[in-house]
Amino acid sequence: MIMNINKYALLILGVLVAASCDKAYHEIYKPTELGAIQREFYVDAEGGNVEVTVYANEPGSVTVLGDAANWVNISTTSFNSDFELAISAAANDGFKRKANVVFESGERKDTVAVYQYGTIEEKCRILAQSVIIYNNDEVNSFETDINVPFEQIKQAVAYNTDDEWLSEMKLTQNTFTFKAAKNTDKINTRSAYLSFQYRNGWDEVENYMVTILQARADNKVGTFFSAEQLRDVATTEGYTLPEDAIIEGYIVSDRENGQAGDLQVLDYQQGTGVINTDENEKTAYMMSVDGNYGFKLVTENDYDNEFKRFTKVGIKAGGAVVSKTADEPVRYTITGVSSINVISCSEAGADFPKKEKYINELTDNDIYTYVTLKDCEIPMRKGPFTPVNEGYTTVNTYNRCAKYPVLIRDINGGSMYMYFNMTCPYRRDGSVMPYGSGNISGVIVHELYKSFEKNGKIGRYQIRHFHREEIDLAADFKDGFSELITEFRYVKNPGEFEETEFTNAILATAGNGEMCHTYGAVGNYSPTYMYLGPANNRNNQYQNGAGIILEDGTQYLPVEGKEKDQNTEGKCDFSSNLMLSWSNKYWWDNGYDQGYCWLVAFSTKGISSDRVSMQFAMYNNSQSARSPRYWKAEYSLTTSDCLPKSADQWKLIGEFTVHDVAIWATQNDWQTCGTRVYDFPLPTEILGKDKVYIRLTPRNNMAAAKSATSYDSSTIANNSGYNTMDYFAVRYNK
């Protein structure tokens, strides 16, 4: 027993001694601590100060390295422990620059970098990737953009042959010039590879490589096909280009935002929907050098499509197939091209053909060319770019909605659609659509959209943009060319003391006017898919709203206390009790054998303009179908009576079709999962009037079958098939 106690006592004593030794060891051999919390700082060209927190447990020094000491001051050059270092940078009227500040303590070092912007942009750009030259005695050249000292640029050249055939090479601010010995080889071209390397003021290395391709002895690198020649040889079956074929033009697209390809749904079946997204990865657009013609390029694989946007390229296109469509408007496609076969490439410069047009100035020759549409607006002051049920899109992987056409119009009254693919990251990111006007740039296309029209034809031309900045529209409505006469963005019921011309009417939310349904009340309030997003966010509820910005700059929040009644499944929907859309299910008056109407009344007194138009958003919101398919829009300056006895007092504005909402179990390609925006020019004779009436009416009683398996094989069923409105407006040019 005693032996055991002594044993444990010795053990405890040993632990205490070890602990004492360990403490002494750490006191004697305490490690050096040194380090800054943050190691990179950025300062404006005007100069400024930064504070650096440094941890240290030993004395040390602070040093500014090199020439940076001429423009950087530090608050101390020494330290004993943790400290705050103030670094001050003087104003910089030159290129961007970098200062390294070093902390040293014993054998430990740490460095902080201060990056300062400059008032002068530092440029060392080689504006070519590859160049074709011929056998002659001329001086060859390509463009540069350089303002840095030439001695800081390292140059090198390599050849694919044993002989060195470039001479008199000279780099200047705007050009690189050189001469080339003649190629005597009758069979083969030859290449040289120029490299340029520059280390900028922030110590970043910029590398450029230019390939020089020289023609063979007969001065040919291949057979050039001009844009006109490509169109001439194109057939509907496809013409195969000869092996030495070379084509040339400007690449005007990229696939960065998933906007290049014409995405199509291949399978609408529940749970197995398929969208061909490969089309986006393999599609590029090339515009002729003069800008007159365009071609759709389709590569074999996605890795063949590494074309750079806004570059002028020459491409070896031997074996590629040029085809044209059999239907109007004729479109030209080149399949089987590859970016690996680019033999000349340079950035688009001042010679890039800038095409600026109004919508009504577009022609078939503009298809697949890059065009800026002037003075445009998106006349839908509500919702995101793509107001669709996200339950059917790529976000939820159900893949039954591939793209969506956004209505745009211009100051001259022309209108068309702008496509958004469901792969576009900003199509529904929570941002409000721009309300004002400006320019929209992109490639003109002709693509079908069967979800709006059974034949897919939604206009002769559409536009594909590729980046958000190409939708260059002002954010504020006051910064646009339009003014509103009447607008309905949500259900606004009359107040207690407000009188209306129509029974059970709703009031305009901007401008003046009222709307009713001729069967009775406006009717039910409908679900709508106007939530701004982000798409598939199931948790933020009404955080970003429906994109309705009121005149005082605040966002419209419908029905206090109902903010959580929507967007619970990531579909970007709002429930019907939020009253963001309105509907009715009575559409055929059997007694008079005519349709009931959406009826709008408003005043245009005191308004004059050369342009006035109407826009509305509508769809048939019933999965049991039998909603009206074929519609007409009419106006009257004399009556609101919609009975047959007053038919001669109504003038036709235009006719249109309305699609059905998608049916989850059995969706057809002529159904869609969102609303459609329509645009109609109105006659200026409606201006300056005390009262104007517009009605939207089924022009016959045709409807889809009850099962919605046919487009128009049945008749309208009252108290069954809903028609829904998301928006209505009449506007004029200021």
Image: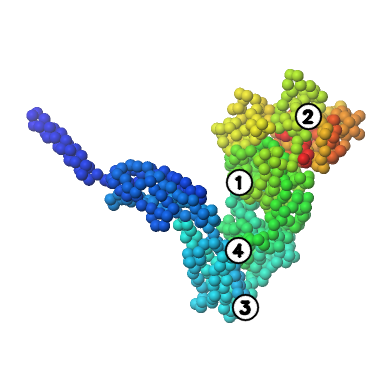
CA gap, disc 2 and disc 3? 76 Å
x and y percent of residue 686 in the render? 85, 36
Do the numbered discs 4 and 2 sit on residues whose CB atoms are within 8 Å?
no
- Marks 1 and 4, the one that precedes in the sequence: 4
Q: Residues within 10 Å of mark 1 (few under 14, many from 20)?
A: some
**Residue occupied by mark 3:** 136
Residue drawn at x 41%, y 49% as measured from the top left: 73
x and y percent of residue 247 in the render? 66, 66
Q: Secondary structure at mark 1?
A: loop
User: Could you say which is closer to the camera, residue 218 or residue 39?
Assistant: 39
Residue 218 found in image quarter: bottom right
- Of badges 1 and 2, nearer the viewer stands 2
Do the numbered discs 1 and 4 sit on residues whose CB atoms are within 8 Å?
no
Q: Is residue 344 visible?
A: yes
**Residue occupied by mark 4:** 346
x and y percent of residue 137 in the render? 61, 78
CA gap, disc 1 and disc 2? 39 Å
Q: Is residue 529 visible?
A: no
x and y percent of residue 50 in the render? 43, 45
**Residue occupied by mark 2:** 513
Q: Secondary structure at mark 4?
A: strand
**Residue occupied by mark 1:** 423
Q: Amino acid at mark 4?
A: Ser
Residue at the farthest bottom position: 184
User: Could you say which is closer to the camera, residue 242 or residue 69?
Assistant: 69
- Marks 4 and 2, the one that precedes in the sequence: 4
Point out the image quarter for the C terminus.
Answer: top right
Residue drawn at x 47%, y 46% as measured from the top left: 48
Q: Secondary structure at mark 2?
A: loop
User: Could you say which is closer to the camera, residue 379 or residue 187?
Assistant: 379
